[in-house]
Image (cartoon, helix red, strand yellow):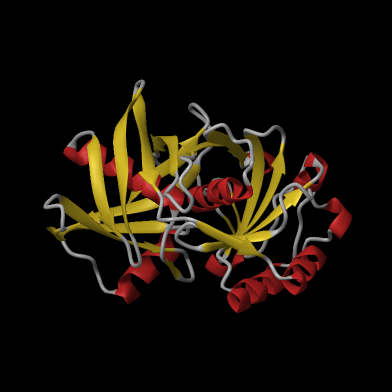
């Protein structure tokens, strides 16, 4: 079984979040996929197999995503990697993907001399985060209520999975992010939160983000497409002046710069289109996921 190593949401020739992609005739059993994902060690590995015809009569691809410690229903950066892998294997185009709980599409295309992809997320929704959850999260990250940007209240944002959005008033607080891995994993499991989405709005259309992923065994993801879609949907719910799209800079504080673009249509709950460039990795490229609860050391 061949695992392709593909870095998604790259910043030109640099950065990006690595994902494993396995194209196969039939998906292995869940235990085998979990073991492969743990061995690969990236924040997610996607397993892809040709599926039966779907209602629209187009060919669909069954996709399952595994983090090192758990299966997740949807992963954005791995979906971008899947789109590029299918485009390289089948030719550029739009591919229908059947996930555990949603049906989406991903476009794989040429981008200059390389490759890129864009997915349509599952439908989005958001709700207020409870005061108790916000207080516990603030303690976890060493923050206070006064550190939050009250223009973007703390919320649970959803685009295939739940993400706790905490908007910060100062970029420096994002840079200084630290937390206890075990406590965060326990909180995420109890609340059903896939990532903690800490963000800073540089402008109405440019955001900086950091996304701890302790429930999956990853201290921090350098690029998180699912969280980007969820954030974009939440901003739409808020009536934020996004002007149809936001750009997200992620991974900069890890030394792994990543660029994500989320395009937002006006209809409430509609999918969000998230796009980025990819890089097919080779031996020696290394891996970007931060495992075992170890923070990135700042210079």
Q: Position of residue 163 (x, y in %)?
A: 58, 60
Instruction: Please give the name of the residue rendered at 57% of the width and 34% of the height, measured from the top-left corner.
Output: 247
Can the viewer see residue 257 in this picture? no
- The extreme top residue here reads 112
Does 166 appear above or below 260? below
Instruction: Please give the name of the residue rendered at 75% of the width and 66% of the height, measured from the top-left corner.
Output: 134
Looking at the rendering, which quadrant does residue 85 occupy? Answer: top left
Instruction: Please give the name of the residue rendered at 44% of the width and 60% of the height, measured from the top-left corner.
Output: 160
Does 50 appear above or below 113? below
Looking at the rendering, which quadrant does residue 169 occupy? Answer: top right
Total labels: the figure holds 0
Instruction: Please give the name of the residue rendered at 14% of the width and 49% of the height, measured from the top-left corner.
Output: 58
Q: Quadrant of the N terminus?
A: bottom left
Task: Give the left or right position of residue 134, taking residue 71 as reference.
Answer: right
Towards the viewer: 280 or 208? 208
Q: Quadrant of the C terminus?
A: top right
Q: Position of residue 120 (x, y in %)?
A: 38, 46
Looking at the rendering, which quadrant does residue 156 occupy? Answer: bottom right
Q: Position of residue 46 (x, y in %)?
A: 35, 57
Q: Position of residue 293 (x, y in %)?
A: 66, 64
Towards the viewer: 19 or 259? 259
Can the viewer see residue 118 in this picture? yes
Task: Give the left or right position of residue 295, taking residue 82 as reference.
Answer: right
Towards the viewer: 174 or 40? 174
């Amino acid at each position: 079984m061949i695992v392709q190593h593909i870095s998604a949401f790259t910043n030109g020739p640099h950065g990006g979040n690595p994902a494993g992609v396995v194209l196969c005739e039939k998906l292995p059993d869940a235990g085998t996929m979990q073991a492969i994902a743990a061995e690969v060690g990236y924040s997610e590995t996607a397993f892809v197999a040709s599926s039966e015809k779907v209602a629209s009569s187009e060919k669909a691809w069954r996709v399952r995503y595994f983090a090192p410690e758990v299966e997740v229903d949807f992963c954005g950066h791995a979906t971008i990697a899947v789109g590029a892998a299918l485009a390289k294997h089948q030719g550029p185009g739009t591919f229908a993907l059947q996930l555990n709980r949603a049906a989406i599409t991903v476009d794989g295309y040429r981008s200059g001399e390389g490759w890129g992809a864009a997915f349509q997320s599952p439908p989005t929704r958001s709700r207020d985060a409870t005061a108790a959850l916000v207080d516990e999260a603030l303690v976890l990250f060493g923050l206070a209520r006064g550190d939050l940007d009250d223009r973007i209240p703390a919320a649970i944002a959803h685009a295939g999975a739940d993400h706790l959005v905490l908007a910060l008033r100062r970029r420096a607080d994002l840079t200084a992010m630290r937390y206890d891995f075990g406590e965060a994993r326990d909180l995420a499991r109890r609340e059903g939160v896939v990532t903690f989405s800490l963000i800073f709005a540089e402008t109405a259309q440019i955001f900086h983000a950091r996304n701890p992923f302790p429930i999956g065994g990853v201290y921090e993801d350098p690029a998180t497409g699912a969280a980007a879609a969820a954030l974009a949907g939440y901003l739409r719910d808020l009536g934020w002046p996004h002007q149809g799209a936001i750009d997200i800079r992620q991974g900069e504080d890890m030394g792994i710069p990543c660029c994500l673009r989320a395009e937002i249509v006006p209809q409430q709950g509609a999918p969000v289109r998230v796009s980025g460039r990819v890089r097919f990795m080779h031996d020696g490229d290394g891996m970007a996921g931060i495992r075992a609860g170890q923070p990135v050391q700042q210079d």
